[in-house]
Image (cartoon, rainbow, N blue to C red):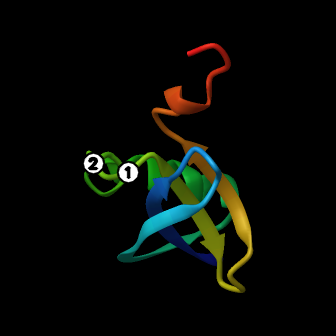
């Protein structure tokens, strides 16, 4: 069983992540896939006006999943 942490933040068009927050909940799951499913179920934490990036780390702090939300600033020609 692995231990994962869910994070969210704001990603600027230049890639800088600001306004970082970490969920107070630790996700215990047998696989990273199961942890991602649990993270996606936490919509109240993930989806806010101040968030356009979410990511999941393992118990060593390594990135195991990320999701960019509302990245229209990065679409060419927009």
Between 65 and 11, the residue placed more toward the observer is: 11
What residue sits right under mark 2 in the picture?
48
Relative vertical location of residue 23 with respect to residue 45 in this rendering, above or below? below
Looking at the picture, how far across and down is residue 18, in whole percent?
47, 66
Residue at 27 percent across and 48 percent down: it is 48
What residue sits right under mark 1 in the picture?
51
Which quadrant would residue 13 be assigned to in this image?
top right
Label 2 close to label 1 by CB (< 8 Å): yes
Residue at 65 percent across and 84 percent down: it is 59
Looking at the picture, how far across and down is residue 2, in whole percent?
65, 76
Q: Residues within 10 Å of mark 1 (few under 14, many from 20)?
A: many
Please give the label number shown on residue 59: none
Residue at 64 percent across and 50 percent down: it is 14
Give the CA separation, mark 2 to mark 1.
Answer: 5 Å
Looking at the picture, how far across and down is residue 36, in whole percent?
57, 53
Q: Secondary structure at mark 1?
A: loop
Left or right relative to 43: residue 58: right
Between 40 and 50, the residue placed more toward the observer is: 50
Left or right relative to 63: residue 73: left
Looking at the picture, how far across and down is residue 74, in whole percent?
61, 31
Relative vertical location of residue 74 with respect to residue 55 in this rendering, above or below? above
Between 69 and 65, the residue placed more toward the observer is: 69
Q: Pick the quarter of the image with the C terminus.
A: top right
Q: Pick the quarter of the image with the N terminus.
A: bottom right
Relative vertical location of residue 14 with respect to residue 1 in this rendering, above or below? above
Which residue is situated farthest in the top direction here? 77
Left or right relative to 1: residue 52: left
Left or right relative to 40: residue 63: right
């Amino acid at each position: 069983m692995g231990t994962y942490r869910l994070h969210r933040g704001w990603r600027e068009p230049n890639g800088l992540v600001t306004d970082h927050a970490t969920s107070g909940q630790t996700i215990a799951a047998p696989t990273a896939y199961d942890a991602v499913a649990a993270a996606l179920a936490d919509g109240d934490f993930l989806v806010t006006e101040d968030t356009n990036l979410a990511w999941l780390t393992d118990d060593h702090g390594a990135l195991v999943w990320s999701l960019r939300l509302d990245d229209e600033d990065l679409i060419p020609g927009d």
